[in-house]
Image (cartoon, rainbow, N blue to C red):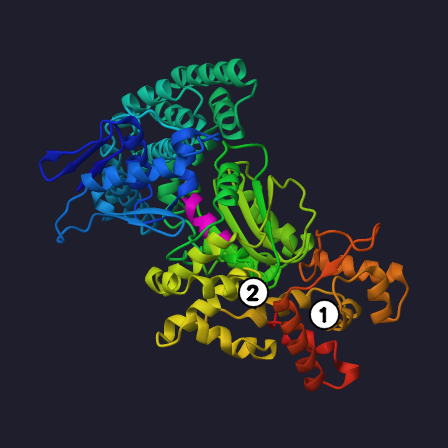
Amino acid sequence: MRVRVLGQFEVARGEERITPSQPKLRQLFALLALNANNVVRAEQLIEELWGPEPPSKATGTLQTYMSHLRRLLPADDATVSLLHTRHVGYALTLPEQDVDAGRFAGLVARGRSELDSGHVESASEVFRTALAVWRGSALSDVDAGPVLEHHIRSLEETRVGVIDQRMEVELMLGHHHEVINDLSTLVRDYPAHEGLHVKLMMALHLLGRRSEALHVFQRIRSTLIDDLGLEPGQQLQQVHRGLLVGNPQIDALTPTSALRSGSWLEPPAQLPPDLPVFVGRTVELAAAEGQLQQPSRSAPAVVSVVGPPGSGKTAFCTHLAHRVRARFPHGQLHADLAEQTPVEALTGFLRAIRGTGAQLPDSIEERSHLLRGWTAERRVLVLIDNAVSTVELAPLLPSGGGCAVIVSCRTRLPLRGTSLAVDLHPPAEDEALELLGSVIGWRRLRAELPQARRLIRLFEASPMALVAAANRLAIRPHWTIAVLLDRLRHRRDWLDELVNARVDLLNSIELSCRSLAPAHRDAFFRLAGAASEPLTTRGASAVLGCDQRTAEAILESLVEHQLAAVDRGPEAFPGQFHYRFSPLVRVAASSLSQFAAASAPPAEANDFWIRRAPSA
């Protein structure tokens, strides 16, 4: 089967055209094809068809439409094209090459890989092939709803980004004669795209046509002021000033000179691997992606992600970074502040940028200035994991308005300039079931749905705990979920039963404990072991033997560090906040306090956390 969405919508089986003619079937098929091999939630499909206020019988009507789509698919067993019903939605299984959007994405990734390897001519050819896959505006003959509209915008933005990068590569190769006509057409098609105008000005400059390059600047400046009320960005103005004064240093700004210096050939690509399957967090991902895909601004976009231990912050941030990495062609940098000091992380950034043998200044301030200078005119993505303070983050932040930062935080940080703060709350039960099913298989999950729901409630839907449990079941296929539940009857057995090489519940909570003040850490162990919940400041002061004001400060510190939660249920004690600890946090706190006490004399107990931290 072949599906074409980059232009008019077409579906073909062999030589036979089977494109649905009914508008809503076209919407559904297109949305499923754009998300091939991933589950599209039923509520997304319903929103696409009927908007935010669907009719009361929308679910039944959707099932009818899906039955119609199934009849369009090949019926023989030899095909790999299948429409699957999942617990929370539907998935269309198609080889990536069967959807032109998939072919386009694959070619773009290959072109960028060629560029990263220094094969510039090959990269140019691959980018040209990728753009040739497009036959017009995406889904130009489909009456798209809100969900498809988002996908169409994303596709078009990616296309423009690849066009921009292809033009950059052509200029790197010195093909300014060949691309003048293309660039002239492109700036007419995208009159507010600053990057394309910069490249046209550079190409005209290289051909000795300075007056025409200045006219290009005046034209986009008028467009930006009239339509958006904005002055041109820093790079456009820099090129304009260079042209006005005949500055010879303008040649250093051209991609051709960048090729000669070698600085464009190996942009850093430090992102950790993405998950094979990422489940849920649809709303949070869409909001974060929207922030990171906005046009360049005066300062980097910053998305901070906070949540309790085991909520999936690292997985969320990594997946988000991979979704938007195409918008940051000048590199992606990554640091895990649980494993590195800020100095080590910054040094790693600069080594990736300048080469392992580059001489670096001694002070962190000077190294940070180097990073800010290098990122000022580039589009770079910085992913930082396990941040606990703004002080350690400050030297790692880029300066350019085309850059972006994604940071996972173990405590709420007052980051200046934060574009979006994402709170990762426990997922809904259907998302938690989908997470389990993605690891142990849908047939196995459906056979024990009641037990699966019990497992979710047991861990209060903690993603890390559920993944650990699912991994345990995956490597022991003779176990049922009921068997695992029986082995988890006693909380003291949880850590032993959920041990996994890739998922470490205890370590996740220990990392959060490290950033607590010693007195608050000791109080945390005592309060997490308290029998009664919810806790009030009065109850905490009785446990700790301190006044209520001190107890409140400790409890609020634990909430900030995501080790305690404010109970939002009905208040049993009017006028007071109520605090509680999740079962997983209680189990980990008990284990960590025992381990610390057994590992060091009481006078040295606080030093245990320093010794446990990674060496600088």
Q: Is residue 354 above or below residue 615?
A: above
Count of marks, rendered view: 2
Tell me if 335 is positioned left or right of 273 in this view. right
Residue at (37% x, 74% y) in the render: 475
Of residues 112 and 277, the one drawn nearer to the viewer in this rendering: 277
Q: Return the residue at label 1.
A: 528
Q: Is residue 66 above or below residue 114?
A: above
Depth check, mark 2 against mark 1: the one in front is: 2
Q: Return the residue at label 2.
A: 459
Identify the amino acid type marked 2: Phe
Gap in angstroms between the C-alphas marked 2 and 1: 16 Å
Label 2 Cα crowd, 10 Å radius (few <14 / some 14-19 / many 20+): some
Q: Pick whichever of labels 2 and 1 is earlier in the sequence.
A: 2
Kind of element beneath mark 1: helix
Q: Are marks 2 and 1 in contact (CB under 8 Å)?
A: no
Main SS, magenta region, reads helix
Q: Return the x and y of residue 255 as percentages of the image width and height.
A: 38, 36
Q: Return the x and y of residue 477 as percentages of the image width and height.
A: 35, 74
Residue interval drawn in magenta: 316-325
Residue at (74% x, 64% y) in the render: 533
Where, quadrant-wise, is the N terminus in this rendering? top left
Q: Residue 240: within the magenta?
A: no
Where, quadrant-wise, is the C terminus in this rendering? bottom right
